[in-house]
Image (cartoon, rainbow, N blue to C red):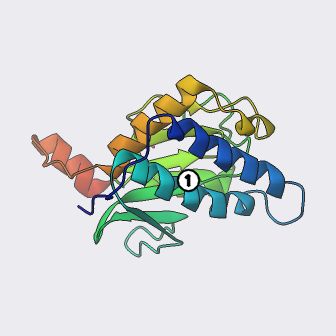
Amino acid sequence: MARSSKPETKASAQTIVAEFGRTVSQKRGLGGAEEDQLRGPLEILLRKLGTFIGVEAVPYGEVRLGSLRARPDYAVNIGHVRVGYVELKKPGKGVPGAAEWRPGRGDQEQWTKLCSLPNVIYTDGVTWAQYSYGERISPIVRLANTVSDLRRPSAPGVDDLVGVLRRFLLWEPESPRTLSSLVRILGGCAAC
C-alpha cells in the first residue's frame, strides 16, 4: 500500500473536516445539482484524511462496474490497489439505515446493486456509514445537524469519521470461512 510520507497532527482532522464544511457551505445555493456541489470537496477530504491516516488515497469518479450494471460515484485506490467505493447523495438524503433515508426507486435499485460490494461508504456529506455486502459495519456518523453546521463539525463526529475512513482505506479482502459466506459473496446480498 502507498503510505503517505508526512502524516498531519491529530488536531488537524477537525480542521480538515471543518474546511470541507466551509467549502460545501460556500458552494450551496449557487446553482447546480446539490449532490454535485459535494464532489470536489469530498475528493479533497478523502485525500487529506487519507494523509492524516497515513496513506495516499486516490478517489476517482464514476467507475463503471459492468457485472453489476452500476456506477458508484467514486472508486478509491491506495497506490494501485482499489480498496472500495464511495456513493454520494445530496445533503439531507442520509444513508441506508438512518432515520432520514427514504430511497426513491432509483436509489433503491442502486443500493441493491452496491450491496454486492465488500467495502462501500455512503454519505450525504453530513451523515456517513460503511457497508460490506449490504450490512452496515460502522456506526452512522453525523458530523453536524445540517450542511450549514458542517463549518463546525462535532469533535466526536470527526473522531468517528476518522475511524470509519481508517477501516475503509486500510481494508483488505477477507476470505470466506463458510460455504454460506462464499454463496453470499458470489450471489450478492439478497437482504438488500
Q: Nearer the viewer, residue 36 or 7?
A: 7
Residue 24 picture location, percent across and down? 74, 52
Residue at position x 48%, y 58% in the image: 47
Viewer-nearest residue: 66 or 57:
57
Residue 139 in the image: above or below residue 12: above
Looking at the image, the residue that sits furthest to the top is 156
Identified by mark 1, the residue type is Leu
Residue 99, quarter of the rendered image: top right
**Is 159 situated left or right of 67 in this image?**
right
Classify 133 as above or below 60: above
Q: Residue at x 69, y 49 (%)?
A: 104
Quadrant where the image shows the N terminus: bottom left
Q: Is residue 122 left or right of residue 31?
A: left
Q: Is residue 39 visible?
A: yes
Front residue of this view, candidates 187 and 61: 61
Residue 180 position, x and y percent, is 17, 41
Pinpoint residue 102: horizontal percent, then vertical percent.
Answer: 68, 39
Q: Which residue is mark 1?
A: 45
- Asked whether residue 132 is in view, the answer is no
Residue at point 19%, 43% (across, down) = 181
